[in-house]
Image: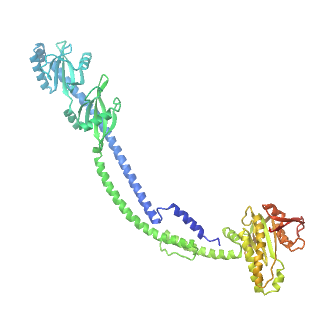
């Protein structure tokens, strides 16, 4: 029987085996699912925390550096303002003016040194109105020196006084230039503080950031003026800064040195001609993130412990779930083999238990259905049985174009009278078995057995384009098979039998006929009657042929047959004549 569910289930199982090459067992899939889900959640959490902490640290550093830049600038401006105030006070000192007017160089140098000590400066110079250095505490031995800060002095001449950051003798100073009035300007007094590493380290304590002061003059051989950073880091910083536009306000960039990352804010201290002097404030991102790294290590340990606990819990859950599932899978395999009597023993009070109970109910239903299908398949043809089982059985039908084949044994009544009923039944079963096999092999459906007659359908309940050809080929093969069958019949003591076959194609009503309590799938219509009448005509001495087909059947076939026109005959029960042909076997 083709009605069993086994082959279909096996095909689905084969397809499933193709898409699960790595995870054959449900337990493996379940474990993989839980662990993957947990791993993804943990990974997403770590990534989120990591990103959030780094972003927070960068934001904090940016804010701190921005504030630090303002503080650093204010401190430098405040130093410049204090220096200018003290220098103005000194320039107005009466004793200092008298010492300068004496033109005694030793006296002037002594006064300048005293002034330098009083204001705690690193540089004091007296400059004439014609830009000649009259006295310099850096070089007291030089009588008259060359001025190294023309821009700052020009600024003082234009605005009365000036402040600037300048480089002299390889050192950088923050200077202030004020006029020496008596009461008109008679000279310029210049004082300055050294801008060096010590100064920046003092400021680092206040702004909590590393500071590097850089001269951005392209011709400067040593652009780094001072820095709180190690030399290698400051050089890396210089390379990074040279690639960006430092003219932008609050320029920010990241500098990587080895495995450490620095966030840098750039503040312009002074613009001179075509270059500028900048201050780069830096904070180590790794240093700020140290508390987070500690937290992250704790989270790593926690996540590893969670993962291990989840593995143990998942294994336990998977074992609990998969054991009954495995039992159900084994049950399905037994059902796939056609062993519908198989039952599963799963005692669970949850959905799995309900599934096992439903499985057992299903197997009982399949067992009963298989018995019905086997019995039905022996009573009617398999296609009809399948048609009845797949639909709701109800009375009614539909119009279909069907080719109907009728065949019976000639003079069967005489054969029956001369032999015992048991032998006759054996003969009849042999005949029907042989002919039915041929009909079914060509796609025909046995509609019914009427004594020694067989009624077969081609096109109901399933239609095919070559239904007419299938019927004609069946008839030819049946005629050919009769020779072999007769040899067996003769060995049983019977005389050879002869058959007649009638074939017609027409539109008929196909469906379930009968009563609500007993029905039969069949076809009714004039086309059925014509096929029966054509089979009767094969017994006529007028035509002398075993197979008679209608013109309608021949028209529906491919025409590749040996036929003989027999004429247009009046068939009992039909007004119009029917064109008929003899179908002959090729010699």
Quadrant housing residue 453: bottom right
Q: Position of residue 50 (x, y in %)?
A: 35, 48
Q: Nearer the viewer, residue 291 or 14?
A: 14
Query: Looking at this rendering, what residue extends furthest in the bottom direction?
Result: 420
Residue 101 position (above or below residue 527): above
From the viewer's perspective, is 370 left or right of 95? right
422 versus 98 height, above or below: below
45 on left or right of 496 = left
Q: How is the image coloured?
A: rainbow
Residue drawn at point x = 34 percent, y = 46 percent: 53
Tally of marks: 0
Front residue of this view, candidates 270 and 171: 171
- The residue at the point 80 percent across, 72 percent down is 406
> Considering the image in quadrants, where does the C terminus appear?
bottom right
x, y percent for residue 82:
20, 26
Q: Quadrant of residue 525?
A: bottom right
Which residue is outermost to the top?
184
Q: Is residue 136 visible?
A: yes
Give the image quarter of residue 94.
top left
Q: What is the x, y in percent for residue 584?
A: 82, 68
Task: Determine if residue 525 is in view.
Answer: no
Residue at 36% of width from left, 63% of height from top?
309
> Which x, y percent locates residue 444?
73, 69
Left or right? Give the position of 439 relative to 16.
right
Q: Is residue 258 left or right of residue 448?
A: left
């Amino acid at each position: 029987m083709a009605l069993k569910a086994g082959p279909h289930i096996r095909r689905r199982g084969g397809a499933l085996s193709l898409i699960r090459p790595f995870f054959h067992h449900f337990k493996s899939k379940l474990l993989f699912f839980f662990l993957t889900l947990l791993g993804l959640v943990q990974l997403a959490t770590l990534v989120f925390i990591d990103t959030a902490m780094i972003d927070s640290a960068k934001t904090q550093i940016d804010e701190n550096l921005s504030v630090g830049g303002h503080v650093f600038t204010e401190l430098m401006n405040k130093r410049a303002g204090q220096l200018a105030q003290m220098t103005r006070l000194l320039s107005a000192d009466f004793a200092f003016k008298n010492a300068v007017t004496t033109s005694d160089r030793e006296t002037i140098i002594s006064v300048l040194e005293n002034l330098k000590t009083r204001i705690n400066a690193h540089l004091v110079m007296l400059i004439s109105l014609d830009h000649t250095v009259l006295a310099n505490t850096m070089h007291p031995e030089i009588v008259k020196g060359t001025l190294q800060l023309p821009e700052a002095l020009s600024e003082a001449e234009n605005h009365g006084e000036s402040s600037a950051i300048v480089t002299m003798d390889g050192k950088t100073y923050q200077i202030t230039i004020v006029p020496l009035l008596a009461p008109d300007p008679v000279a310029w007094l210049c004082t300055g503080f050294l801008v060096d590493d010590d100064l920046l380290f003092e400021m680092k304590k206040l702004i909590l950031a590393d500071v590097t002061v850089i001269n951005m003059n392209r011709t400067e051989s040593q652009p780094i003026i001072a820095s709180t950073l190690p030399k290698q880091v400051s050089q890396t910083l210089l390379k990074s800064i040279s690639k960006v536009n430092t003219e932008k306000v609050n320029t920010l960039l990241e500098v990587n040195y080895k495995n450490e990352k620095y966030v840098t804010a750039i503040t312009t201290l002074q613009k001179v001609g075509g270059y500028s002097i900048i201050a780069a404030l830096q904070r180590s991102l790794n240093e700020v993130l140290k508390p987070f790294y500690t937290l992250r290590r704790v989270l790593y340990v926690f996540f590893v412990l969670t993962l291990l606990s989840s593995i143990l819990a998942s294994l336990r859950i998977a074992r609990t779930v998969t054991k009954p599932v495995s039992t159900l899978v084994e049950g399905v395999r037994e059902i796939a083999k056609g062993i519908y009597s198989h039952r599963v023993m799963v005692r669970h009070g949850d959905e799995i238990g309900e599934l096992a109970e439903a499985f057992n109910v299903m197997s009982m239903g399949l067992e009963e259905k298989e018995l019905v299908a086997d019995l039905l398949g022996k009573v009617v043809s398999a296609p009809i049985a399948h048609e009845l089982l797949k639909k709701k059985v109800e009375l009614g039908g539909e119009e279909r174009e069907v080719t109907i084949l009728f065949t019976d044994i000639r003079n069967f009544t005489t054969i029956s009278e001369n032999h015992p009923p048991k032998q006759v039944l054996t003969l009849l079963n042999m005949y029907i078995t042989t002919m039915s096999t041929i009909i079914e092999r060509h796609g025909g459906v046995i509609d019914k057995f009427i004594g020694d007659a067989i009624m077969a359908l081609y096109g109901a309940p399933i239609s095919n384009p070559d239904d007419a050809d299938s019927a004609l080929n069946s008839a030819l093969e049946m005629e050919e098979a009769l020779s072999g069958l007769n040899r067996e019949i003769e060995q049983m003591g019977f005389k050879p039998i002869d058959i007649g076959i009638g074939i017609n194609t027409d539109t008929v009503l196909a469906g379930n006929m009968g009563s609500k309590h007993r029905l039969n799938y069949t076809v009714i219509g004039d086309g059925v009657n014509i096929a029966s009448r054509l089979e009767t005509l094969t017994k006529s001495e007028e035509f002398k042929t075993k197979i008679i087909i209608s013109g309608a059947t021949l028209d529906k076939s491919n025409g590749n047959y040996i036929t003989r026109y027999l004429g247009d005959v009046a068939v009992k029960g039909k007004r119009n004549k029917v064109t008929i042909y003899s179908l002959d076997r090729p010699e």
